[in-house]
Amino acid sequence: MMFGDYSIGDLGAILAMQGFAGLILFSVYVLMALGLAIIFGQMGVINMAHGEFMILGAYVTWMTSNAFQHYLPSLFPGYFFVAMILAFIASGALGMLVEWGLIRHLYKRPLDTLLATWGLSLILQQAYRSVFGAREVGVELPDWMMGSAQARESIQIPINGMFVMGLTILITVVVAYVLFWSRWGRQVRAVVQNRVMAGAVGINTEKVDRYTFGLGCGIAGIAGSAFTMIGSTGPTAGQLYIVDTFLVVVFGGAASLLGTIASAFTISQTQSTLEFFLSGSMAKVITLLAIVAILMMRPQGLFALKVRK
Amino acid sequence: MIINSRFFNRSELIGFVALALLLFVILPLTLDVFRLNLVAKYLTYAFVAIGLVLCWGYGGILSLGQGVFFGLGGYCMAMYLKLEASSVANTKIQSTPGIPDFMDWNQITQLPFFWKPFHSFPFTLLAIILVPAFFSFIIGAAMFKRRVGGVYFAIITQAIAAILTILIVGQQGYTGGINGITDLRTLHGWDIRTDHAKFILYFVEVVLLFGCIVAAQFIRLTKLGRILVAMREKEDRVRFSGYSVANFKIFAFCAAAIFAAIGGAMFTLEIGFMSPSFVGIVPSIEMVIYTAVGGRMSIFGAVWGSLLVNFAKTSLSESFPQLWLFGLGALFIAVVLAFPDGLSGIWRDYVQPHIDRLIASRKSKARWADGSVADGAPAE
């Protein structure tokens, strides 16, 4: 059948190769899902425009790369760090604006946030199309990120994948620290659990909401920076990721950051491994079907907080 | 079941008559066949929107996958029409005559087993209803029995819409791929491409639409409708009162799916093709928008919402293609923020009181003219 033509050694190498090839996809998933886990898992807002925040980050990365090529060619190898920071700031700022203009009126109606943010995503898509054009743009990578390390005879590890992966781990750790151990993170969780009570004990809930939403969107912006390495950026590219990202978050258990990472890993690796044996579309169908089937059996996701209902 | 004042209250009766006048008389008399066909296309979405009123407005179950059922109904019809269009005589030039052209292009030499029953017209009609009902039952049973609801249900139905789209696009030998099933000609020997046929199909569709409206109104007014509302407001309390919440939700979801499938089948007949672009996430969410704009609690509102949003979409995207998405997005945000009850809410809050006052003042004037005050005629 599917595995018939390969020896076990080959299969191992294929799995490892596809595994490393899936690293960037994994990173994009983790970063997107991390932002969404904060916005959806913590705040309960269904942000259908999350993909568009990611694409904003991707466009910012593209512009930064162009700017460096034109004005500071000597510093081009390091542009990615600047781009990431700018992407975070741009998406985060837009996120805070959206929270102020739209989301804060809807905290009591979670399903309506879905419709409103879908409208927002349409507007953003058209805005990208008007500003950047309908054609997809690609980002040029600096030399040191190209190529791959030869781990073993038949196994190659792409350098940009390792780099993005390292960054992702760093960001995840920082976010986990901020959310679970810092004073601000405790305030966020207090507001989420009981907005009125949190206000009563002196937390500025409006400010907390705004910064939390901004943080989630900002991380999506960083995901956009990573995204430029695996795909070309177009006005509607973000829409393709939004369902996957929601599934990652739900599959992992909405409130659990660890679950989000585990499920991003499982999903991206399943898909990338299946892609080697099947066509891309069937790999995607089987992955999604498996997730939906598992979610039907275990609706609370992989890592659920124990809550008495 | 008689249409009396209990079945439709006065304002609903006015709405019913107004809609019937518009769809049966005014539009067919004033529009040419091309425009009438466009209206017919808009109305196919009204079927979906009515289903969403039941399942989302009343039951509180937001499904973002209604495109799946719209598509299933549409594809069932399209498969029948395609088989009829690709008779051996019509497809002589293919390497395998007698199978649909796209199969021939994809080097498939035998009709796949799931296509075979669609040679039969009665089977097709049954399949249009039963296939979506079966799938919605499976999805609903799996989710509602485990008490998955709200946001999670919305996301999973959305994922299902994505899966079906990718599957249809990927398996183009069996499904026609991204282009869909095109070049449909006759329905049981009757050419559906002529203007006359389009005219007749329009009336068939409107009759079906009113059938769905009456069915939805019936569901809404029975005890079932009350339970749906009760469930939406306080699910646990309904459960503790001894009702099986899951079964009622499954019913509402299946009813919505069947309505959507009827709409899809009519879409295929009216427009002459079916493609995955009516199945996926984007069309599914747009269908929710029609319902939201019309008013998620109003059956007539759903029809008006589908008509008006689509009319705006066609006319705006014809003249200002750039602005259309801005307009649609803004409409969404405005409806959610300012008018959660949509058009029907605006009607109820701003127009209805004026009409009531007008009727009331005219009545009192009439009474004055008669000189007979306060005999009979209780206040409405």
Image (tube, coloured by chain):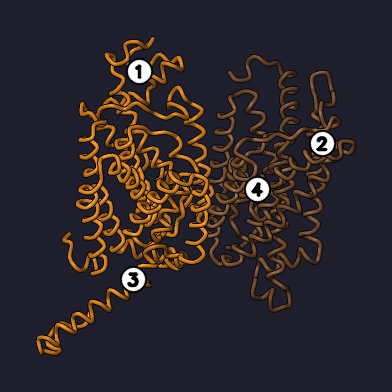
Chain colours: A brown, B orange
Secondary element under disc 1, as helix, strand or loop, is loop
Disc 4 packing (10 Å; few <14; some 14–19; many ≥20): many
Q: Residue at 47% of width from left, 31% of height from top?
A: B168
Label annotation for residue B99: 1
- Name above or below for residue B376 compared with residue B123: below
> Residue A290, image x and y in percent?
57, 37
**Which residue is labeled 4 in the image?**
A252
Closer to the eye: label 2 or 4? 2
Q: Residues within 10 Å of mark 2 (few under 14, many from 20)?
A: some
Secondary structure beneath disc 3? helix
Q: Dot 2 corresponds to which residue? A: A69
Circle 3/circle 2 CB separation < 8 Å: no
The residue at 38%/42% (across/down) is B70
- The amino acid marked with disc number 3 is Val
- Chain bearing tag 1 is B
Tell whether label 3 touches label 1 (CB within 8 Å): no
Task: Name the subunit of mark 4.
Answer: A
